[in-house]
Image (cartoon, grey):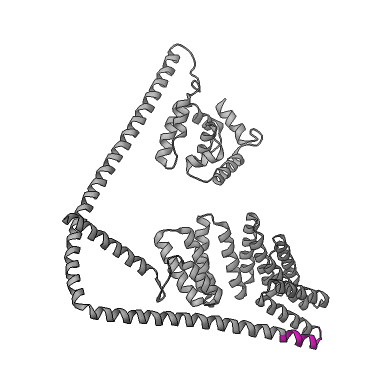
Amino acid sequence: MPALFFFYTLLVLLLFGACQKEVEEQKVVGKQVPASVSLTDLGNEEWRMGNYQKALDYFTQAYKKVKEEGNKEQMATLLNNLGLVHWRLENNDAAMECYDEAAALATRLDMKRLLGLTYTNRALILKEQRDFEKAFASNEAAIAIFKELNEPRDLAIAYNNQGQIYRYGENLDAALNYYLLSLEECRKIDYKEGIATAWQNLGTVYTQKGDAKKAFNAARRCLAIARQLDSKVRIREACEELSKSHERFGTADSALYYYKKYFEVERELMEANQSERLSQNQAELGLEVKNLRIQNLQNEKDIANNRLLTIAFGVLAVLMVVALFIYRYFSRMRFKERQLEMELHNTQKIIDVKEQELKTYIIDLSRKNAIISSLQEGAAPKQETAEPTEEEIAALLEQKILTDDDWAQFQSRFRAIYPGFFSRIKESGVALTEAETRILVLMRLELNGPDMADILGISPQSVRVCKMRLKKKLPSENYETVEAFLEYLIR
């Protein structure tokens, strides 16, 4: 019974500690956050509402968390988000640092879409700084990536940004061309928000070029799509564009009409934002009041039960000390058990390796003896031995090639089955890298791309890239394909 009592006490203490840890982890920016809501989600919500400083706090904490966890992909994404927030807060130096770090991680992790987004974001800052040459180069890199990935939405945004850069640089013809390209990409996926933006920018260029008919047509198309979307932001921008166009082309009454429309929508947006912010503040205030009431009730309860709690804490302290000793005892036992299991596992691995080395040595020795015998009998040794057995091939296919030691062991076993293969590679005169040699070896075993990728611990895309590099190295007059080169090696 005492042992059972201590066990239950220990269980309660562990559960209590876990609950406390979970509560502490959910305390963010001075308030508790539901466990189902992530810091990134909170940052995105604050970003949507325009609370950029709060969004910065959430994204910063989320970045620290994923950095501790070692999640490189999330780190790259959050760095890009942090760059956007810094940009909105007009801290362009910090934004560029975040974009540069995100781009470096995206390059290492082959996150091409994120890399393209960082190029686009950096181009926006460079445009604002009037460094148009670097802005063009950065945005062109983004366009190339989105074309390769076939991302119409991202490509449309990049085209639109390129048009903005040209327009800021007063190159209206180039700006017009890129706005039209953006409009074309948006239409492919029926991206109405992007279509409205493209028409608005086209209206601006046509107005600056003095083409009244096209300017009014573009602005009206923007307004029509904005009304379909019921987007007050887009309606406001379309009305503003129409007002500017009418003012530019001398129709003052129409300019005044659309300016009033613009002002009405602008006022609605301001009132909506203020109302939303007021509701949020009231909700936060109500939560604070509720927490304060709960705290006061808890304090009253603590004062009323002070004596009982003192005794309870004394007993609990004794139980905690006893439970601690028991826990440490069992922890030592488990640690020793794990140590012994690890030593046993390592010993077994060493035995397996030694057995494999012995088998390989015996196979090599037997084949060398056969060659020596054939030489003594006056017969030329064969470059290749008899066809390997299914068991030998299966043993090779079960082995992974993840480290240099794995490759050395695999080479030894492969050479035992196909002794002349590596020498034929050297005789061919083609300089191959270690990775290309591994691809040829696995092709000799008649494996497909996914199986090669599984054995090598890489992606099928990397296998295809390696084959392409290998094909480029081969003399085209001798070998049209990698398979033709392989046939030469195994003849």
Viewer-proximal residue, 145 or 268? 268
Which residue is outermost to the right?
213
Q: Could one spot residue 97 in this view of the protein?
A: no
Which residue is outermost to the top?
377
Read off the magenta span: 249-260
Q: Is residue 94 shown above or below 470?
A: below
Q: Is residue 329 shown above or below 454?
A: below
Residue 234 x, y percent position in the rendering: 68, 75
Relative side of 378 to 124, left or right: left
Residue 443 x, y percent position in the rendering: 54, 34
The chief SS type of the magenta part is helix
**Residue appearing at x 61%, y 41% in the figure:** 472
Relative side of 463 to 158, left or right: left
Q: Is residue 311 magenta?
A: no
Q: Is residue 256 magenta?
A: yes
Residue 374 x, y percent position in the rendering: 45, 14
* Quadrant of the image containing the C terminus: top right
